[in-house]
Every structure is written in structure tokens, then in C-alpha cells.
Image (spheres, coloured by chain):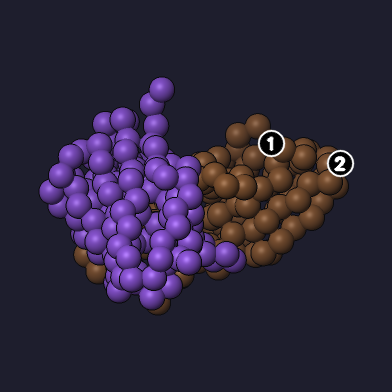
């Protein structure tokens, strides 16, 4: 069935290092891939997204890459800061059963140590 | 101050009771969604609504019910039929419709999430 796999489940880095989170999706027709950041006790917030007509998108310290052939996409955070510590979710937009929906990965808990 | 509000933040329920979670948005969004979040898992779709007076089941609708009588409101009722209701519930909305069959990327809009309600069954 349709699913999104996300790795790693936890990631610990030193402040200033880079962090990379990877996701794979099953439906080759998926065409929109958002990334959300969720802080403790709060709802997820969109931090960056990419559509299938581009291979890479960057916003300051955050970038996302998409490989449609391999059906995977990645989040890259450079120069990490303690406030980047949170749970990050990837998602893929899929059509199923006559309606469209977002399928979420299981999340990655990122810890940035000063 | 625009956005999505959910209430209450924490909710406790005794077994066998129905409870209703509130979700309100003043973003003038057409589409609204309910997700359930369990530890170590991603968000799973319970119900969604493309427009007033219309809603569709998501992947885990059993034991839940919704209504969409007003554009800005999409309450979720957790019934006694839901066997494992303890979870974090998230409401979201988006500007456009959730999508038509065969819809494509240009019709999809960002989903904005509320702060969530943590439901615990005692």
C-alpha cells in the first residue's frame, strides 16, 4: 500500500553541524512533498516543500532535494542551532480511493547539542 | 489574530463516554482535516472535509464522527466505539479542496495545523 518511510528516527548533532533526514515514498504519482517541524506539545508547522517539477529547493539554512526516479527526498539543515531541535515529518501527496491526501512519515527527533 | 484553534488542550474521558474536540479556523479555508498522532508514528488521517456539509472518511475513521455545518468549524467526536482513543489529535485546514479524483499538484495547498488536543482515557 501507499506509505512513506523516514530515516533516521532519531538524530543527534553538535551545534554548527549539518543534519540530513531522508524519506522514500511508494506512489510514483506523488507530486508534492512538504516537510513539517513539530515542537513539543504543538502542532506541526510547514518549513519547506517541493513539487515534482523541481529537483532542489533552498530556503536559508534549509534545503530539500527530490529524486523522482528513486522516489526519495531529503531534508538538509546546515549550521544547526539548538532551536532546530524538534521532531521533523516528511509527507507525500497521494491519490487514493478517489480522493487526495498527505501520507506522513513516522518522524525524526532531531537534537542539536550546544 | 488569524489561525486554527483547538480546544480543549487536554481532555480526559472515562471509558464508555463520547467526547467532542473543537476545531475552529478564521482563515476562510474551504478544506479541513482531522489527524491522530501516536508516539513514534506519523499523522494518520481520520476525516476530512472539502466544503461545508460534506466530509469523507480517512484511513482510521472507525469510532469517530464529524460534522461540517459551518465553514469555520469542524468538530470531531470520539465515540465509545473507538477502542484505543488515547492520542494527540490535530486539526488542519487548507485553502483549496482536499482534491478531486485525478487532481494534480497545482490544485493542492499547504495545510495549516492547530495546536492539538491531547485526549486521555481514564
The residue lying toward the viewer, choosing from A90 and A106, is A106
Residue B103 seen from this side: no
Please give the chain letter of the residue carrying mark 1.
A
Placement of B63 over or under B75, stated as above or below: below
What residue is pinned by disc 2? A114
Placement of A70 over or under A52, stated as above or below: below
User: Which residue is rendered at x = 31% and y = 30% of the image?
Assistant: B26
Q: Position of residue A8 (x, y in %)?
A: 68, 64
Whether residue A111 sits left or right of residue A108 in the image: it is right
Query: What is the quadrant of the N terminus of chain B in the image?
Result: top left
User: Which residue is rendered at x = 62% and y = 47% of the image?
Assistant: A40
Whether residue A112 sits left or right of residue B65 in the image: it is right
Whether residue A70 sits left or right of residue A30 in the image: it is right
Q: Residues within 10 Å of mark 1 (few under 14, many from 20)?
A: few
What secondary structure is found at the residue carrying circle 2?
loop
Residue B71 seen from this side: yes
What residue is pinned by disc 1? A61
Please give the chain letter of the residue carrying mark 2.
A
Q: Residues within 10 Å of mark 2 (few under 14, many from 20)?
A: few
Q: Colour of chain A?
A: brown
In the rendered image, what is the letter of the chain coloured purple? B
User: Which residue is rendered at x = 48% and y = 50% of the image?
Assistant: B10
Amino acid at each position: 500500500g501507499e506509505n512513506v518511510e523516514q530515516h533516521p528516527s532519531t538524530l543527534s548533532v553538535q551545534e554548527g553541524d549539518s543534519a540530513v533526514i531522508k524519506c522514500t515514498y511508494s506512489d510514483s504519482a506523488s507530486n508534492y512533498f512538504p516537510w513539517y517541524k513539530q515542537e513539543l506539545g504543538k502542532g506541526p508547522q510547514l518549513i519547506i516543500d517541493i513539487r515534482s517539477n523541481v529537483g532542489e529547493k533552498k530556503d536559508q539554512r534549509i534545503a530539500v532535494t527530490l529524486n523522482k526516479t528513486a522516489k526519495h527526498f531529503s531534508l538538509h539543515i546546515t549550521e544547526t542551532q539548538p532551536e532546530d531541535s524538534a521532531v521533523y515529518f516528511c509527507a507525500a501527496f497521494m491519490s487514493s480511493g478517489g480522493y487526495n491526501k498527505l501520507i506522513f512519515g513516522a518522524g525524526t527527533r532531531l537534537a542539536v547539542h550546544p | 489574530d488569524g489561525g486554527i484553534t483547538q480546544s480543549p488542550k487536554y481532555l480526559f474521558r472515562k471509558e464508555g463516554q463520547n467526547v467532542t474536540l473543537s476545531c475552529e479556523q478564521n482563515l476562510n479555508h474551504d478544506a479541513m482535516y482531522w489527524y491522530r498522532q501516536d508516539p513514534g508514528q506519523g499523522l494518520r488521517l481520520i476525516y476530512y472535509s472539502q466544503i461545508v456539509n460534506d466530509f469523507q472518511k480517512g484511513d482510521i475513521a472507525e469510532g469517530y464522527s464529524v460534522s461540517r455545518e459551518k465553514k469555520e468549524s469542524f468538530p470531531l467526536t470520539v465515540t465509545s466505539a473507538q477502542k484505543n482513543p488515547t492520542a494527540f489529535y490535530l486539526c488542519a485546514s487548507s485553502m483549496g479542496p482536499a482534491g478531486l479524483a485525478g487532481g494534480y499538484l497545482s490544485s493542492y495547498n499547504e495545510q495549516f495545523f492547530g495546536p492539538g488536543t491531547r485526549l486521555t482515557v481514564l
